[in-house]
């Protein structure tokens, strides 16, 4: 079983790379016949990834959510799976390569550094931890996808304003759709992160004696939550839209990345397990 | 095949000469009557702003483009038209030319699919005036098939190739659903009218028109079920519209950057599309520097048009391949109209039926009678086929004549003989 896990761990970045190549080729060529082929590639990759996660969970007796590199593999699959659903439901083409490349990066880092952890701290076997981590991951996946759509919005916005009618102009969906996709992804991410934070506030003081609200990860997450909260509220009350809104989404994503790096690798946190 | 075609088109003659020979529908009908009386047995007249073309099968044995030309010029006298303004086609080349026209690769705007509809309309006129014979019907079917295949199998008609349409297509890259958007057309001239019609075709939610001459705006608004905005007040109203298309002949700027700034403020930063397709320009080009304002003028829209035309031109080899395939199919069918293969196919069919029936029933006869049964049934078949065979052979001596091909074609259709290609498929 372990050798199967190791093999899939090596194969997964290649599968994501292959899927990315097919999506990118379709982006360049725009051939109708490639629509189904690329979806098949993504489906096979996602299926293999799911098998990998199930095998890891069964073999190591815990879901792969106990350290950064386990979490990266979950992020990779949730990002691509979310995109898969978006593509199926909305039939929006042309944005795939920009999202799948993130899954490739997350999975590549995970595949390079992940270890076979059989022994994990007891505190990490809690059911509440499972819900807490999965909610937070869904939140960050939503923010990641929102940031990608926000970035694509900015690129297309600039291209249209500067009369650049190239590949980006021809392949991407229109600005309103990109703004909407960015907003909805952020909204889903915000709701999921809110659930993660609420559970965290209940569970963390019980699980960790050293718990502190001044912990860098908690402050970082709070800041991200606040940024998205402001953006979504502004949109709902009709103040912000378009460029300003997507800029906020991208800022939120950057803050989220910086906060994760700082709290996991640099700062001393009770909330870091690697 | 004795099909002739003459064409005066955008490549051979300037617009004033093409206009001089343009045949309106009633004129086309009258010309067909004249052609039938004097020269042609069957044919097709295609007349658009870019071309007037006559396809026809001569009633007699003489094949002369000159006579068709003379007939046209007698019907529609025009100055300064010379021999060089006409292209002439014969037989396979004439069919190929019609296919090229129907697929849009011969159009001034490559891939223009309006000509496809015009070919259909022309054929309709031929049908209604009894000018469409057996051969023309088949040519028309093949031309339509080639046209449909070109549209569905290639990108020959993709993208906007006129400035007005490019302006409308660009709005679709900004807004998701035009049915929830509003648009104001400034200038009810031809360009404004075309842009307005494109917007209506794309399902624009609300449309308004303004024009210096109020009556002209009212006329266009009535036609498109749009609202009329007074020209003296329209600047104050522009913030109400998501899309502004301006196409007036005003010598000065009508909408300043300040007007746009005020509008965008009132719009609470909702995207504001300004399409200035006027020469000289109607909207201050500096407006493009404002956030949430998408300003485009003729130059930028022409970039889209040029790009799309280049893409369409790159599709021409694919369309030519389709034309060649359809031409070969047509030619195979046409060749099957020769007498010898048709007689053979007809005899084979009858022999097959005879064999099957004799095979099924011969056990009901004694062995002596079975031999007689073979002889008698063969004799019946020979007698039935004697007259049609003689008639077809007689016609074969006038091979290529329209009457011969029509007879053979009818026999093939009636007995389901098909062409060689059809039987291969089966």
Image (cartoon, coloured by chain):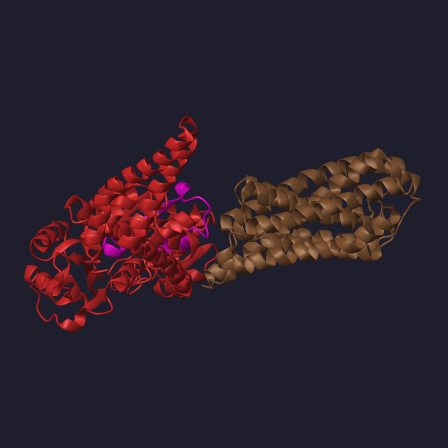
Chain colours: A brown, B red
The verdict on residue B174 being magenta is yes
Residue B183 horizontal/vertical position (percent)? 35, 47
Residue B158 visible at all: yes
Residue at 61% x, 48% y: name it.
A39
How many numbered discs?
0
Q: Is residue B356 left or right of residue B78?
A: right
Residue at 70% x, 43% y: name it.
A139
Residue B186 visible at all: no
Residue A267 horizontal/vertical position (percent)? 85, 55
Q: Residue furthest top?
A: B364
Residue A53 horizontal/vertical position (percent)? 79, 44
State the residue in front, A59 or A182.
A59
Residue B215 horizontal/vertical position (percent)? 17, 47
Q: Which quarter of the rendered picture does the N terminus of chain A lie within?
A: top right
Q: Is residue A117 left or right of residue A94?
A: right
User: In the displayed structure, would residue B349 be above or below residue A159?
Assistant: above
Q: Is residue B281 left or right of residue A55?
A: left
State the residue in front, B247 or B401.
B401
State the residue in front, A185 or A211.
A185
Q: Residue furthest front?
A: B368
Residue at 25% x, 45% y: name it.
B410
State the residue in front, B366 or B39.
B366
User: In the displayed structure, would residue A24 be above or below residue A135?
Assistant: below
The verdict on residue B16 being magenta is no
- What are the residue bounds of the magenta stretch? B165-194
User: Which corner quadrant of the image does residue B302 belong to?
Assistant: bottom left
């Amino acid at each position: 079983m372990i050798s199967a896990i190791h093999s899939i761990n090596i194969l997964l970045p290649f599968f994501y790379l292959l899927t990315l190549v097919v999506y990118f080729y379709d982006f360049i060529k725009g051939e109708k016949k490639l629509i189904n082929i690329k979806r098949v590639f993504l489906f096979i990759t996602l299926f293999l990834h799911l098998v990998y996660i199930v095998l890891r969970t069964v073999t190591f007796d815990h879901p792969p959510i106990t350290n950064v590199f386990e979490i990266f593999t979950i992020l990779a699959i949730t990002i691509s799976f979310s995109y898969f659903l978006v593509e199926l439901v909305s039939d929006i083409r042309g944005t795939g390569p920009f999202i799948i490349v993130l899954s490739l990066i997350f999975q590549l880092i995970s595949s390079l550094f992940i270890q076979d952890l059989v022994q994990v701290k007891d505190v990490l076997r809690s059911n509440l931890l499972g819900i807490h981590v999965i909610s937070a991951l869904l939140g960050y996946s939503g923010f990641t996808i929102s940031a990608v759509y926000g970035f694509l919005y900015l690129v297309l916005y600039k291209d249209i304003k500067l009369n650049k009618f190239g590949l980006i102009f021809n392949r991407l969906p229109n600005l309103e759709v990109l703004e909407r996709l960015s907003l909805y992804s952020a909204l889903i991410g915000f709701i999921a992160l809110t659930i993660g934070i609420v559970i965290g506030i209940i569970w963390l003081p019980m699980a960790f004696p050293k718990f502190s609200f001044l912990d860098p990860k908690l402050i970082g997450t709070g800041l991200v939550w606040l940024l998205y909260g402001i953006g979504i509220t502004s949109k709902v009350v009709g103040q912000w839209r378009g460029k300003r809104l997507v800029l906020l989404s991208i800022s939120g994503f950057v803050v989220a990345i910086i906060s994760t790096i700082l709290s996991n690798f640099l700062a001393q946190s009770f909330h870091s397990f690697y | 095949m004795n099909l002739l075609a003459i064409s005066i088109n955008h490549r051979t003659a300037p617009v004033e000469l093409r206009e001089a020979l343009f045949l309106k529908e009633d004129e086309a009908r009258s010309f067909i009557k004249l052609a039938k009386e004097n020269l042609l047995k069957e044919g097709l007249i295609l007349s658009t702003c870019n071309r007037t073309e006559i396809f026809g099968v001569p009633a007699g044995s003489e094949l002369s483009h000159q006579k068709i030309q003379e007939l046209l010029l007698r019907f529609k006298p025009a100055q300064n038209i010379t021999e060089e303004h006409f292209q002439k086609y014969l037989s396979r080349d004439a069919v190929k030319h019609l296919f090229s026209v129907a697929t849009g690769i011969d159009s001034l705007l490559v891939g223009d699919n309006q000509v496809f509809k015009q070919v259909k309309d022309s054929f309709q006129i031929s049908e209604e005036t009894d000018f469409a014979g057996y051969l023309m019907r088949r040519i028309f079917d093949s031309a339509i098939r080639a046209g449909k295949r070109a549209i569905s199998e290639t990108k020959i008609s993709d993208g906007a190739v006129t400035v007005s349409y490019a302006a409308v297509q660009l709005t679709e890259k900004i807004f998701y659903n035009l049915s929830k958007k509003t648009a104001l057309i400034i200038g009810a001239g031809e360009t404004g009218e075309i842009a307005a019609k494109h917007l209506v075709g794309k399902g624009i939610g609300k449309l308004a028109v303004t024009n210096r001459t109020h009556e002209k705006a009212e006329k266009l608004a009535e036609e498109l079920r749009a609202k009329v905005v007074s020209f003296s007040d329209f600047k104050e109203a522009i913030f109400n519209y998501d899309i502004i298309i301006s196409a007036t002949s005003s010598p000065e700027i009508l909408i300043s950057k300040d007007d746009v700034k005020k509008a965008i403020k009132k719009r609470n930063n909702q995207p504001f599309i300004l399409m200035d397709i006027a020469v000289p320009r109607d909207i201050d080009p500096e407006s493009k520097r404002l956030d949430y304002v998408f300003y485009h003028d003729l130059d930028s829209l022409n970039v889209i048009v040029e790009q799309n035309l280049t893409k369409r031109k790159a599709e021409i080899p694919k369309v030519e391949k389709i034309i060649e395939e359809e031409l070969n199919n047509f030619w195979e069918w046409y060749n099957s109209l020769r007498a010898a293969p048709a007689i053979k196919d007809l005899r084979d069919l009858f022999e097959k039926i005879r064999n099957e029936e004799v095979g099924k029933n011969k056990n009901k006869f004694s062995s002596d009678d079975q031999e007689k049964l073979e002889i008698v049934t063969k004799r019946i078949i020979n007698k039935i086929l004697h007259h049609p065979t003689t008639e077809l052979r007689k016609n074969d001596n006038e091979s290529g004549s329209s009457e011969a091909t029509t007879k053979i074609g009818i026999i093939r259709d009636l007995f389901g003989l098909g062409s060689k290609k059809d039987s291969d498929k089966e």
